[in-house]
Amino acid sequence: AAAEKGGFDSFMEKEIHDQPQAVADTLLGRADASGRLELDELRIDPQELKDISKIVVLACGTSAYAAHVAKYAIEHWCRIPVDVELSHEFRYRDPIVGPDTLVVTISQSGETMDTLMALRYAKEQGARTLAICNTNGSSIPRESDAVLYTHAGPEIAVASTKAFLAQITATYLLGLYLAQLRGKLFQGEIKDILADMADIPAKIQDILERKDEVISLAHAMKDTTSVLFLGRHVGFPVAMEGALKLKELAYIHAEGFAAGELKHGPIALIDEGQPVFVVVPSPRGRHSMHSKVVSNIQEVRARGARTMVIAEEGDTAVGEFAEWVFRVPETKTLLMPLLSVVPLQIFACALAGAKGLNVDQPRNLAKSVTVE
Ligand code: G6P
């Protein structure tokens, strides 16, 4: 068993360390040297994909947060409306889907019953269906018109880590492919984005090499009972995933919020000593977004919160307001989730370890939920 865990104490730690490979393998062989995407494996008529007028992404759990991240990228690159919905909510509310809708399901296992039933419902409504899945030949890809596999390798730990990064990578490939088909990005732009994606594995590796900074924070916080996570834009689903990891692994009450929503309610939760993680957008991106999130850090800090910040290397503005800062390498704004979620995964895993919990098999959870 020790060998299966690659020398780590748990599958979860091993899988966190597998992430550079998971991203690299998911990118492998999907574009030529000029950046032209070749997704022949999709088995869906390119003309049909060109004609779709809307995308609906369906998933549960961590896979649903990958879907939320994907919405930002696909809408930005392809100018197609993208709705994201939890599979189990979708089919009970009379959703508007038809032959011009591409329904994308995201599932690590390919067996999640809620997502499978939503897929069947979408097919009955005449939608085109595409599965993003990590498990070859599982039910969801078998029943879909098209499949784009994530190549994260088998994920054993119940809480998802490397599949999440591979899912974001695959949805981005899909987004770039649709942008290419529909002529929404120049080939040079696609090539440029793919080149930055190809740099992501080394940047994740850089984060993993500094994991001790996160582990010592987790040990110091092992008696914490509540943690809040704030993010904006693609940092918002990262905040929600950071909170989910902490619930799942460490049984700590945690919530992720959109930073802009703070003033509309959640700020009432802040009092002396409340830990708040903040995922800060790049200062090189849209300037106003960065400065608004920095103001949010000041606002919660002024009310006594302890602020733990995930910020880009070279972001000099955040330091003075944060109790703890973890630096992630520079990348394009849309690619940041592939980096900023990693310290949050390490934090949840280390905190659960410090509490003596079984990180691979948290109580009450199953890897693959095959009941509705
Ligand atoms: C279960 C797992 C989660 C996972 C979710 C969706 O609840 O515990 O880690 O994110 O199912 O699974 P899927 O296989 O469809 O991605």
Image (cartoon, grey):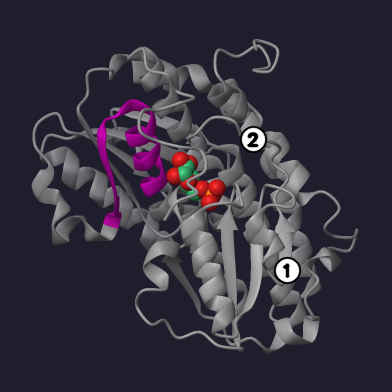
Task: Examine the residues drawn in magenta and state their main secondary structure.
Answer: helix
User: Distance of mark 1 from mark 2, alpha carbons?
Assistant: 25 Å
Name the disc covering residue 19, or none: 2
Magenta stretch in the rendered image: 239-259
Instruction: Residue 21 in the image: state x and y as whole percent.
Output: 72, 35
| Residue lying at 69% horizontally and 43% vertically, measured from the top left | 23
- Neighbour tally class for label 1: few under 14, some 14-19, many 20 plus, Cα within 10 Å: many
- Neighbour tally class for label 2: few under 14, some 14-19, many 20 plus, Cα within 10 Å: many
| Residue lying at 59% horizontally and 30% vertically, measured from the top left | 156
Q: As shown in the figure, which amino acid type bears the numbered disc 2? A: Gln
Per the image, label 1 sits on a secondary structure element best described as strand
Which mark is first along the chain, 2 or 1? 2
Q: Residue furthest front?
A: 371
Instruction: Residue 372 in the image: state x and y as whole percent.
Output: 41, 56
Instruction: Residue 70 in the image: state x and y as whole percent.
Output: 54, 62
Q: Does the magenta run of residues contain 178?
A: no
Give whichever of 224, 299 is nearer the camera: 224
Residue on which the image places disc 1: 146
Left or right, 192 with reference to 61: right
Q: As shown in the figure, which amino acid type bears the numbered disc 1? A: Ala
Give whichever of 176, 68 is nearer the camera: 68
**Residue 142 visible somewhere in the drawing:** yes
Instruction: Residue 283 in the image: state x and y as whole percent.
Output: 45, 52
Per the image, label 2 sits on a secondary structure element best described as helix
